[in-house]
Image: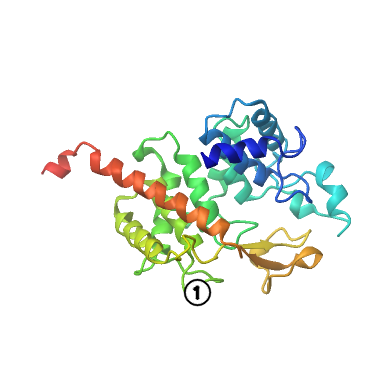
Amino acid sequence: MAAESAWELLRQARGPSDGWGYCPQVPGDADITSWVLRLAEALGAEDDLRADEGYRFVAAHLQEDGGISSYLPQIAAPFLDRVAPRWDAWYASHVCVTSAAAGLLQLPVHERLLARLREIQRPDGSWPAYWWPDREYPTALAAEALSAGCPAGDRPEALSAARWAADRIGADGAVRTEWEPEGSAFATAFAIRAVLAGELPEGRDAVRRAVSYLTDSQEKDGSWRPSAWCRVPGPMEFDPDAREHWERGRRGKAALGSVVLDTKALYTTASVVAALAKASTAAVSSATAAPSRADLA
């Protein structure tokens, strides 16, 4: 199937200790490598030698605060130093990268990442992101990692995240963001995942609305209109949320301080498909679950 073909292609990409990167021209990073390993785990290939090398690569990015950085200076400096002399912020831990890596059950530092996510969850239940302006993304991934294998009644962080995410879903099912004020399929998809991770009973209506919004907004070619905006903070910019102005769509060295849209719709469409699959699985599980006493009363 396509997923297995993709894994075989990725197994042959880059050197054995280089991890994986956004494209062949840039150094490997813990974020992209974590997503490749999530594919490997989904396929049951986590014991593959190439995957084992990937786990070591990601674990090496663990920082003193317990989070995972995107880059390591010894790997990325030869590339990044051509643009600026210091990249302290890019070498620090990033919540969105930590939340993606925390979903790797075979990662040696898995428990440390979960502890870090518990420490930094915001009072409203969300988590902030570094590379993404939409908090739905890290919130869903963190909630899923923290709720994995936990009974529904023993996942307080995920429950808090689910309440936040459910409130983000509008009456028409769309999540509206700064960059997508008319509705973001990308943010809506991750809001669905966050609500499902917390198994929030009162969030079921919000999920149904969000699913309807996504299914109704699919393009004729099967994709969803691009709405995944990635931001490129400056090399010493530790808090991108504090920046007042971002440029749109700059490329190359000029990309610093800009937000870049998923123009090919791949990030957006993959995110929506994953969310709809999880919603479908949750609906089937709910329908086949044995009725509780409350249901029978």
Q: Is residue 180 above or below residue 105?
A: below
**Quarter of the view holding residue 4:** top right
Tell me: 103 left or right of 75.
Answer: left
Q: Secondary structure at mark 1?
A: loop
Residue farthest toward the left in the current orientation of the protein: 297
Kindly identify the residue that appears in the image at 79 percent across and 68 percent down. Answer: 254
Tell me: 147 left or right of 92.
Answer: left
Kindly identify the residue that appears in the image at 53 percent across and 50 percent down. Answer: 121
Q: Is residue 82 above or below residue 98?
A: below
Which quarter of the image is occupied by the C terminus?
top left
Residue 50 visible in image = yes
Instruction: Count numbered badges in the picture.
Output: 1
Residue 260: image x %, image y %? 66, 66
Q: Which residue position is annotated with label 1? A: 181
Residue 103 visible in image = no
The amino acid sitting under disc 1 is Pro
Residue 94: image x %, image y %? 66, 50
Residue 98: image x %, image y %? 61, 45
* Mark 1 surroundings: few (<14), some (14-19) or many (≥20) residues within 10 A: few
Residue 119: image x %, image y %? 56, 45
Asked whether 171 or 242 is in front, the reply is: 171
